[in-house]
Every structure is written in structure tokens, then in C-alpha cells.
Amino acid sequence: MSTTIYLDVDGVLNAITSRPPSEKLTGWTQWDARRVNSWPIMFSTELIAALNELAARPDVSFKWLTTWQAAAATQLSPALELEGQEWEALEGDLHRWGGRDWWKLRAIRDDATPKEGERFVWIDDDISGERPAIEWAQSRPDVLAISPSQALGLTRDDLDSLTAFIDQAAG
């Protein structure tokens, strides 16, 4: 079985905060801050290392699903030392936000077509506020949706859930 992970940036890799979030809430102890395209990025270097390990697995592939679109691969990945330069970036009408016409929901629905032996993980801090996205994910037993707090980003507990979902598929 294989798993495709659709990854957002802001509120997921980039904790939207001016100071590193607490280890108690995130599970991460090592944080760094950088500017990429003049945007402040607060990220856990431990999270980046863990994502690089996942990306190296033969049963896992990543795709960008973010308003950064192609810049996630070309500019953000190198700046964070994330091995995401070759990941495909799904695109859409960035002005379509919310509801059934949310560009990210439309993009993942079009891309994550059910296939025997394939599973999908969608990680985006905005999922929890989008009822149609929640309903879509819940209607698909092959989809795991993770919607982290934007102030914390993807936590160690989130990563553990994601890894367990992948390992369950592997066997």
C-alpha cells in the first residue's frame, strides 16, 4: 500500500506565532525562525527531520497543497532544509475560499481518486473550519485529515497519528 500526503505550509509547517510554541503542547524542543520571501516562518527542525524521514520511505509520497503553490517547492523547501523540492504542487483559484468551492477541497477531491491499495493524508490547519472538507474526509475511509492549531503547527502527536495511519496500511 502507498500513502500520499497533501501538505499545507502556514499553520502546519509554519507555526503562526512570534515565539516558539511550548514543548508541552507540541512535543518539539528545537525551533528555528527564518524569513522566506519576506514571510516569517517559525518551524520545528525536529518536525522537518521527521518529514524528511517519511519522504524517504518508498510507500510514501508528498504533494504540496498550499497557497504557496510552486514556491513551496522552489523557495520554502530549500530554506527549511525540507526535501520537498521535487514534490508536485497542486494549484487552484486562490480566490475561491470556503465551502464546497474551496480551491484546496476541489484540488484534493480531483487528485485523491480512490485506488486499490492507496491511502491519503490531508494536513491543513483550515480543515477544521470547513464543514464540506470535514464531510469529504469523513466519507472516505482511505483519507486521514489532520487539522493542527495554526499557532502550534503539526505536533508530535499529529505526526504519531500520521505514522500509525501509514504503518497500518503497510501491514
Image (spheres, rainbow, N blue to C red):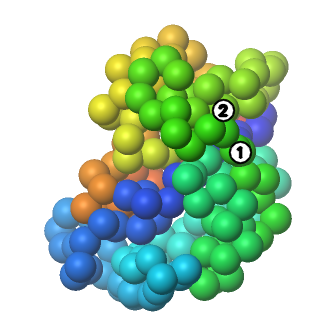
- The image quadrant that residue 25 belongs to is bottom left
* Left or right placement of residue 170 versus residue 97 in this view: right
Instruction: Name the secondary structure under disc 1.
Output: loop
Q: Are marks 1 and 2 in contact (CB under 8 Å)?
A: yes
Image x and y of residue 94, in percent: 56, 43
Query: Which kind of residue does numbered mark 2 sit on?
Result: Ala
Residue 48 vertical placement versus 118 (above, below) = below
Q: Quick one: label 1 or label 2, which is nearer the N terminus? A: 1
Q: Nearer the viewer, residue 132 or 114?
A: 132
Tag shown at residue 107: 2
Q: Residues within 10 Å of mark 1 (few under 14, many from 20)?
A: many
Tag shown at residue 41: none
Residue designated by label 1: 90
Image x and y of residue 84, in percent: 71, 67
Residue 140 vertical placement versus 105 (above, below) = above
Whether residue 89 is visible, yes or no, is yes
